[in-house]
Amino acid sequence: VSVMEGDSVTLNTDFTEIPEDDDILWKFGVKMSLIAQIRRYAGIFNTSDVLDERFRDRLKLDNQTGSLTITDITTQHAGDYTLEISGAKRSSKIFNVYVYANLPVPVISSNSITNCSSSSSSSSSSYCSLVCSVLNVGHVTLSWYKGNSLLSSISVSDLSISVSLPLEVEYQDNNSYSCVLNNHISNQTQRPDISQLCHTSALSIYIVLMFHSVCCG
């Protein structure tokens, strides 16, 4: 089960109604901490956050079906949830819950060292080097697109402090490029203002060159 951070997820028992003699136990993690139980014969219907406070005010138990809902979920709630059913027949079921953090919007900047190089006089195009970056992400793919065509991409599995992807673009294709950050269930897109990014960087380079020329003769 995959879910975004802040959403709710329901783990279903597949019962429309719990058999009268059956007991339902929900346990979490490697330590199998008891977080919810239904014992109909004893009149017990409750959730528990005593053993694991990360679930405080986040668990809802359906007394009819035994299904468990985790609300306002965070990455701390990712893991294995075990459903144990005992009665006339014993059975168990494990739910693997994956929680993805909300994705940041990619940031696009110009590479001031190499950008805005002019093409040869035989070509009518000019080029600019851009960099798309994101911070503190994991299990994501960062990609450059031109229209609907994938130009380049990089994927990271573990949490990374910074992920960057460069691209050389043409001035004449302004607004046709996009940088997309995505995981299995969501994405964020940023489109560069090429004329603004490249013009600003070109001006900076020009000023530096002029200053060097004046100072150094």
Image (cartoon, rainbow, N blue to C red):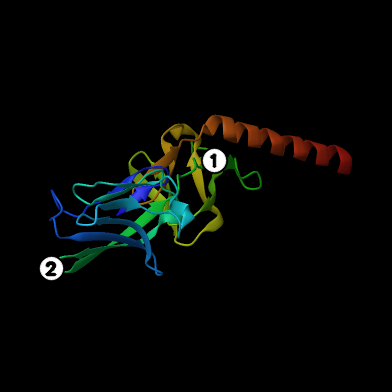
Residue 18's x, y, as percent?
15, 53
Which of 208/42 is in front? 42
- Residue at screen point 61% across, 32% down: 199
Image location (x, y in percent) of residue 53:
48, 54
**Residue ID at (50%, 42%):** 106
Disc on the earlier residue, 2 or 1: 2
Relative to 198, does residue 56 appear above or below in the rendering? below
Q: Is 125 placed above or below 99 here?
A: above
On screen, residue 38 above or below 86? above
Residue 21 image point, x, y percent: 14, 60
Q: Is residue 138 above or below residue 173?
A: below
The amino acid at mark 1 is: Ile
**Quick one: quadrant of the C terminus?**
top right
The one nearer the camera, 23 or 163, is 23
- Disc 1 secondary structure class: strand
The answer to whether any part of residue 175 appears in the image is yes
Quarter that holds the N terminus: bottom left
Q: How many neighbours does mark 2 have within 10 angstroms: few (below 14), some (14-19), or many (20 or more)?
A: few
Q: For marks 2 and 1, give the one nearer the viewer.
A: 2
Q: Which mark, by number, is residue 204?
A: none
Residue ID at (54%, 41%): 107
104 or 194: nearer the viewer? 104
Residue, disc 1: 108
How dense is the environment of label 1, judged by Cα within 10 Å: few (below 14), some, or many (20 and up)?
Answer: many
Label 2 sits on what residue type? Lys
Specify whether residue 120 is in view.
no
Q: Which residue is mark 2?
A: 89
The residue lying at 37 percent from left, 42 percent from top is 7
- Helix, strand or loop at mark 2: loop
